[in-house]
Image: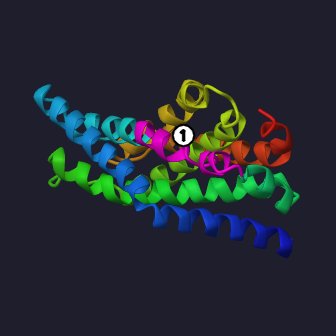
């Protein structure tokens, strides 16, 4: 178990260092997200909608589209430099590659959300609105978990295909619909008193997230074959 976790950590740390060294990739994702939330918040303010109605929708649409840019790079850098086969041979267990890539994508998404969520809060004029951080933070984490898990799995499936950049977002959206519905409900409920229905959405998110981590871990040998 110790050797397995060590392999996961080494791949994870390699990817995090790559992201730090090529900071323009993370910066471009953040700038794209900022642009999206500015445009959407401006449009929603013109439509004169309540903050509670607009915040969760703007936030998660921005996160979803920005994450496509970030997660698509998971396996692309190894494929572009012809080192994916070496990585597969060096680890022996392909599940460890998935877990490391998933954790790296989750880290990037959480950093991204830590930047754009306060900015959206300011842009949309929500400074006077009280929100439950005890619900908002778990919703952000569980939604990011699902997005990172599904995105990493699909990126591994499509990276070696000629039309990978086209197929990835097309396949990602249908699988993400349940997560988006649940997480938007939970985020919106952070502005009101949470009830049983919100707890049910949180349980659904947690179960969905676990499913899309466990299944790729078991089947990643086949997933990487495309």
Q: Badge 1 is on which residue?
A: 201
The foreground one among 192 and 38 is 38
Q: Secondary structure at mark 1?
A: helix
The residue that appears at 63% across and 67% down in the rendered structure is 14
Position of residue 35 measured from the top left corner of the image (x, y, whole percent) = 25, 42
Quick check: 82 left or right of 59?
right
Q: Is residue 150 above or below residue 121?
A: above
Q: Which residues are magenta?
A: 64-82
Q: Residues within 10 Å of mark 1 (few under 14, many from 20)?
A: some
* Number of disc labels: 1
Left or right placement of residue 84 versus residue 73 in this view: right
- Relative side of 59 to 128, left or right: right
What colour scheme has been applied to the protein in the rendered image? Answer: rainbow
Is residue 68 magenta-colored?
yes
Q: Is residue 56 magenta?
A: no
Which residue lies at the image location 55% right of the left edge and 31% below the top edge? 165
Residue occupying the point 41% across, 46% down: 194
Q: Position of residue 45 (x, y in %)?
A: 14, 33
Residue 38, how many percent across, how many down? 21, 41
Q: Residue furthest front?
A: 81
The quarter of the picture where the C terminus appears is: top right
Q: Quadrant of residue 87?
A: bottom right
Depicted 226 relative to depicted 216: above or below: above
Picture coordinates of residue 43 (x, y %)?
Answer: 17, 29
| Quadrant assignment for the N terminus | bottom right
Q: Residue at x 64, y 53 (%)?
A: 102
Image: 19 above or below 152: below
């Amino acid at each position: 178990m110790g050797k397995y976790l060590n392999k996961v950590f080494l791949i994870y740390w390699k990817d995090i260092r790559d992201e730090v060294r090529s900071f323009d990739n993370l910066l471009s994702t953040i700038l794209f997200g900022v642009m999206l939330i500015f445009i959407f918040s401006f449009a929603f303010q013109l439509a004169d909608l309540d903050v509670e109605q607009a915040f969760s929708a703007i936030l998660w649409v921005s996160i979803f589209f920005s994450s496509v840019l970030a997660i698509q790079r998971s396996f692309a850098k190894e494929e572009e430099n012809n080192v994916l086969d070496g990585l597969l041979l060096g680890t022996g267990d392909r599940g460890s590659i998935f877990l490391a890539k998933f954790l790296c994508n989750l880290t990037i998404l959480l950093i991204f959300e830590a930047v754009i969520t306060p900015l959206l809060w300011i842009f949309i004029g929500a400074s006077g609105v009280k929100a439950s951080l005890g619900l908002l933070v778990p919703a952000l984490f569980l939604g990011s978990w699902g997005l990172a898990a599904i995105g990493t799995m699909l990126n591994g499936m499509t990276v070696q295909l000629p039309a990978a950049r086209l197929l990835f977002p097309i396949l990602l959206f249908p699988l993400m619909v349940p997560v988006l519905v649940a997480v938007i409900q939970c985020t919106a409920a952070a502005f009101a008193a949470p009830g049983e229905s919100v707890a049910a959405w949180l349980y659904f998110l947690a179960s969905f997230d676990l499913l899309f981590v466990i299944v790729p871990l078991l089947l990643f040998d086949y997933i990487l074959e495309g």
